[in-house]
Amino acid sequence: MTRQVDSTAAELHDLVRGVVDDGADDMRRFILEATTKTGDHRVSSGRGSHAGRYETGTMYDAVDSSATTDGAGDRVRFVGEFGWLNDVLDYYLMQENGTSKIDAMHALHKAFINASEKFQKQVNDIVRKNF
């Protein structure tokens, strides 16, 4: 049984790592897809290649992911996260949630929904396969 638990733990770690990496990729894609009038003008005037929320790349480049595993045997804890993990600027949150003058992009929110659905499905698949 220990071998099966260790194998499943390794499989779950790989799953968490994949889900958070995909979540970060989705979030970056949603940032680029969240076009604005300012972004459209930036592209049409030749001052940029993205009409989305990408001007300097700072907010886009700040998206990261992390996956860790603690413990051993049947006492393993998996932690996965993605988003703006370091130095979250107020600007990012205004773009994400919107203001009275800025439409919300919901990049983190939409990426979280995708990641949650993927995680739940894949965990169920692993449990069915191994137990």
Image (cartoon, grey):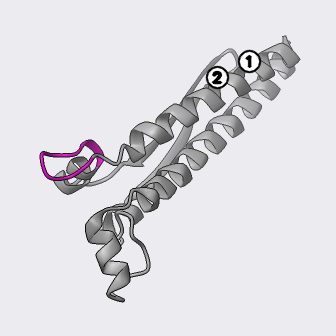
**Amino acid type for the residue under numbered disc 2:** Gln
Q: Residue at x 82, y 28 (%)?
A: 7
Magenta span includes 100: yes
Residue 15 drawn at (x, y percent): 69, 36
Q: Is residue 108 left or right of residue 91?
A: right
Circle 2/circle 1 CB separation < 8 Å: yes
Residue labelled with disc 2: 120
Between residue 10 and residue 89, name the one nearer to us: 89
Magenta stretch, overall SS? loop
Secondary structure of the residue carrying numbered label 1: helix
How far apart are the alpha carbons under marks 2 and 1? 6 Å
Between residue 106 and residue 17, name the one nearer to us: 106
Up the image or down, 54 lies above or below 99; here it is below
**Amino acid type for the residue under numbered disc 1:** Asn
Q: Is residue 87 left or right of residue 123?
A: left
Q: Residue at x 50, y 46 (%)?
A: 66
Extreme residue in the bottom direction: 46
Residue 61 drawn at (x, y percent): 40, 65
Q: Residues within 10 Å of mark 1 (few under 14, many from 20)?
A: few
Up the image or down, 20 lies above or below 116; here it is below
Residue labelled with disc 1: 124
Residue 78 drawn at (x, y percent): 57, 29
Up the image or down, 50 lies above or below 118; here it is below
